[in-house]
Image: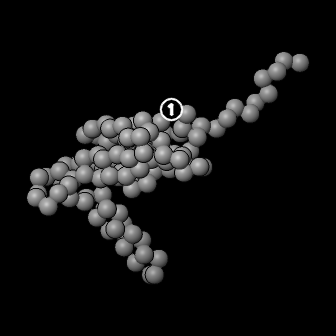
Amino acid sequence: MKKAIILLLSSFLLLVACKTPASSEHTGFYKQTGHVVDAETGIPLPGATVTNFRESVQTDKEGGYTISYHTYDSDLRVFVSHPGYVTDTFGCAPMLVRLHPMPKDTSDTKQR
């Protein structure tokens, strides 16, 4: 029962976080801001691409981004990519995205 309440509360908080108004006036659009960083070092990733089904934006020199949603959007998924990193998908644009570097090829390529 306790786990069910925690899960329900977590789901509600996620929904509220994804639908944050863009401004005090109601425009029908919501904006979500965040940052993209390297998961291992925490260093910002400028030039990362953050995409939802409405728009695609690039992160600034500090790894920051702002992406828009419409109040009628039913799919809030966002895709985050950067060269040399594993592309990740989220239920909505998180405040802090930690991208993991692509795994290094550890296979032995030397011929014997």
- Residue located 29% across and 53% down the image: 32
- Residue located 46% across and 81% down the image: 2
Please tell me which residue lies in front, 31 or 11: 31
Which element type, helix, strand or loop, lies under badge 1? loop
Please tell me which residue lies in front, 109 or 38: 38
- Residue located 25% across and 60% down the image: 20
Identity of the residue furthest to the bottom in this view: 1
State the image coordinates of residue 104 (x, y, percent, origin top left): 67, 35
User: How many numbered tags mark residues here?
Assistant: 1
Looking at the image, residue 112 sits to the left or right of residue 59; the answer is right
Looking at the image, residue 34 sits to the left or right of residue 83; the answer is left
Q: Quarter-wise, where is residue 16 in the image?
A: bottom left
Please tell me which residue lies in front, 109 or 67: 67
Looking at the image, residue 72 sits to the left or right of residue 4; the answer is left
- In the displayed structure, 34 sits above or below 56; it is below
Residue beneath label 1, please?
Answer: 83
In the rendered image, the quadrant that contains the C terminus is top right
State the image coordinates of residue 65 (x, y, percent, origin top left): 35, 45
- In the displayed structure, 8 sits above or below 36; it is below
State the image coordinates of residue 107 (x, y, percent, origin top left): 76, 30
Q: Quarter-wise, where is residue 80 in the image?
A: top left
Q: Is residue 89 visible?
A: no
Answer few, some or many: residues within 10 Å of disc 1's Cα (few below 14, many 20 plus, some between 14 and 19): few
Looking at the image, residue 73 sits to the left or right of residue 9; the answer is left
Q: Amino acid at mark 1?
A: Pro
Q: Is residue 98 visible?
A: yes
In the rendered image, the quadrant that contains the N terminus is bottom left
Identity of the residue furthest to the front in this view: 61
State the image coordinates of residue 111 (x, y, percent, origin top left): 84, 18
